[in-house]
Amino acid sequence: MTPKTLNDTEQLNWLRLSRTEGVGPITFRQLLRRYGTCAQALKVLPELSSKGGRAKPLTPPSAQSIEKECAALKKRGGQFLFLGTPDYPAALAAIEDAPPVLAVLGHPHLLHQKIIGIVGARNASLNGRKMAESLARDLGQAGFTIASGLARGIDTAAHTNSLTSGTIAVVAGGVDVIYPEENRALYDKITEAGCIVSEQPMGLEPRAQLFPRRNRIISGLSLGVLVVEAAHKSGSLITARMALEQGREVFAVPGSPMDPRANGTNDLIRQGAILTECAQDILDNIGKGPQGLCEPHAFPLEPLLPPADEAQVEAGRLKILENLSTCPVPVDELVRSCQLSLPVVLTVLLELELAGRLDRQPGQQVALIG
Amino acid sequence: MTPKTLNDTEQLNWLRLSRTEGVGPITFRQLLRRYGTCAQALKVLPELSSKGGRAKPLTPPSAQSIEKECAALKKRGGQFLFLGTPDYPAALAAIEDAPPVLAVLGHPHLLHQKIIGIVGARNASLNGRKMAESLARDLGQAGFTIASGLARGIDTAAHTNSLTSGTIAVVAGGVDVIYPEENRALYDKITEAGCIVSEQPMGLEPRAQLFPRRNRIISGLSLGVLVVEAAHKSGSLITARMALEQGREVFAVPGSPMDPRANGTNDLIRQGAILTECAQDILDNIGKGPQGLCEPHAFPLEPLLPPADEAQVEAGRLKILENLSTCPVPVDELVRSCQLSLPVVLTVLLELELAGRLDRQPGQQVALIG
């Protein structure tokens, strides 16, 4: 069960399952762990969600709609990369909530280079943009590919100055949706010389809640993330936090305390990010991170579970619910306190998750949604 | 031999010895350690320097010239503070090369408050001066006295905004010499409301090599030193280094890498200084330093040595010289390798020092001057 490639049917099912409402990247992995294949998971999905308490059972998108998306991506010269296959970027595969599938336009080989994420304020200062420009250029010359988010300000400066050396734009909506509109020309150049990446379906317009999810991909692709200008509570700080959670290095450009656009980066430095004035500060500190990021990643991470006894699932459902609350508990603790088998507990958790009643949190923890 | 006060004659001798050319703060202490009193040290000084190889024996300043300086200081309402007496600031007494005597104008009680040094660029930016102003004001309100160097830029901003809460100007020349001239009005205000301090004789004009020596007094008086703007290789970084050597906390205000005036402070942060955006960053981290800084400091630090046998000194001189080079060696290692008594070795080292042939270095090390 370590698929190296997926055949057409498997790809179709993989896309259907991962595109199902309520099936996030972690749920996707749990379903595979419990049911072995996407085909089997798709089969049990409606029933599972009903048992979890969902009024209208979950329905995956039709094979037809997925085929349509595949054709649209192919027409634009794009392709899908599936988690667990050799084409999927190894650094990204290493994160807990790696996207089951990525849509890619342009040159996917860039995803296998040594990547540094550069993020920062959309309303960047002239000096901030200059910093991003020179850092992107110098890192490019040092052999790094740059990942960023195609936003105004710092992102734009970073992409523009890494077009020839290697640039990756991770977008929050569909890979074919240009946002912001003013970056249309840049988007076209990146499609030609670089790489556009998204975990979302083609055609999807970006929404506010998609940006933090996008940010985890920028950091997940990267050995380290550089934050150039960032105010308190800005999106770039979310990317930095995710980088830390993913075990990646965080770099930050300092600035005057009088400039609100430096408050976030100064805070990061106070918390241990590496103070960065030039590319050398990054080169001196990169690649000392976790080993194995550049190794192709075996999938699934978790071994396939033995089947759960249906009678035990029926009998255990209430007990598990009683042991859950809005306060997160580790799954293994839940297994111990309920005195039920792991397959039984995971099945019930999947039911609740698919019914939209359970939230997965970092560190293998789960909580009821209040 | 822990003098609490000095009588007039002792003060006179103390000033004569400390004002003798070639007798630095550490040599001063070694002379007292070896000869017990300044009177005795003054007596042997010419002979010691001759034996060390000095062509023209050292001569201390005349009692008359010292009496003249005392009168001049008294006339301006000033006073001398002698190392080892209760009036001498305890934090400064704790440093290895504490000045044997300080001349003070204004309010010496400020020297016994909790002190923060604020230093930085003379050619400070408007924003840098604003930072120094608000930090000095807020630290003053939090009960701290500010020490700085009366220079243009950051120093001026720091003094101006701590006049009412407590400000100390440590000057590189004589306590009565106003430098820079443009700060005459500020100097007058500090004399009235604050405190002016110098280890140099009255009337001495500041020279380049006196500024680093002055800087060690700013940091030596302080629990911590804040650097607001500083270019690479600037004097403020010397103050920061001295603060570290003295076991004091170092704080630095970050700035954009595009601003050369922030390169020094950013470097300090990279090396472990506490990133400082506001007074709270200092308040959160001060007073966690070495204990005892606020305890009155006993003097001399080193116990009086037994007298050295003259014959052994004569016999040992060559051996000690042979064991010395321009590469520093610890004194205790020298004692061991020469197999001579400590009083003998220290006597010969004093001879060489007073002849201008020996350099004392941090960590009780000595080296021949090349």
Image (cartoon, coloured by chain):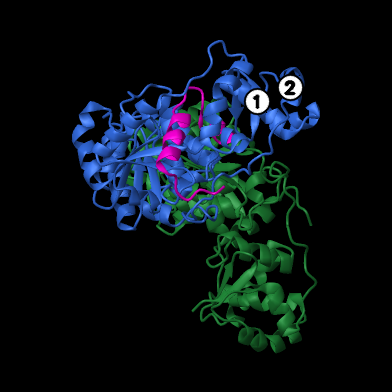
Chain colours: A blue, B green
Q: Can residue A173 be seen in this view?
A: yes
- Residue B319 image label: none
Q: Which amino acid does label 2 sit on?
A: Ile
Q: Which residue is drawn at 78% across and 74% down?
A: B307
> Which residue is identified by label 1?
A349
**Where residue B131 sits in the image (x, y, percent)?**
42, 32
Q: Write down the region rendered in magenta.
A: A1-30
Relative to residue A63, is residue B359 depicted above or below? below
Q: Give me the chain letter of mark 2.
A: A
**Where residue B359 sits in the image (x, y, percent)?**
56, 71
Q: Distance between the residues labelled 1 and 2?
A: 8 Å
Q: Quadrant of residue A225?
A: top left
**Where residue A81 sits in the image (x, y, percent)?**
40, 43
Q: Which amino acid does label 1 sit on?
A: Leu
Q: Residue at x 60, y 17 (%)?
A: A357
Q: Give me the chain letter of mark 1.
A: A
Q: Is mark 2 on a helix, strand or loop?
A: helix
> Which residue is identified by label 2?
A320
Q: Which of A283 and B61 is in front in this view?
A: A283
**Where residue A332 sits in the image (x, y, percent)?**
73, 34
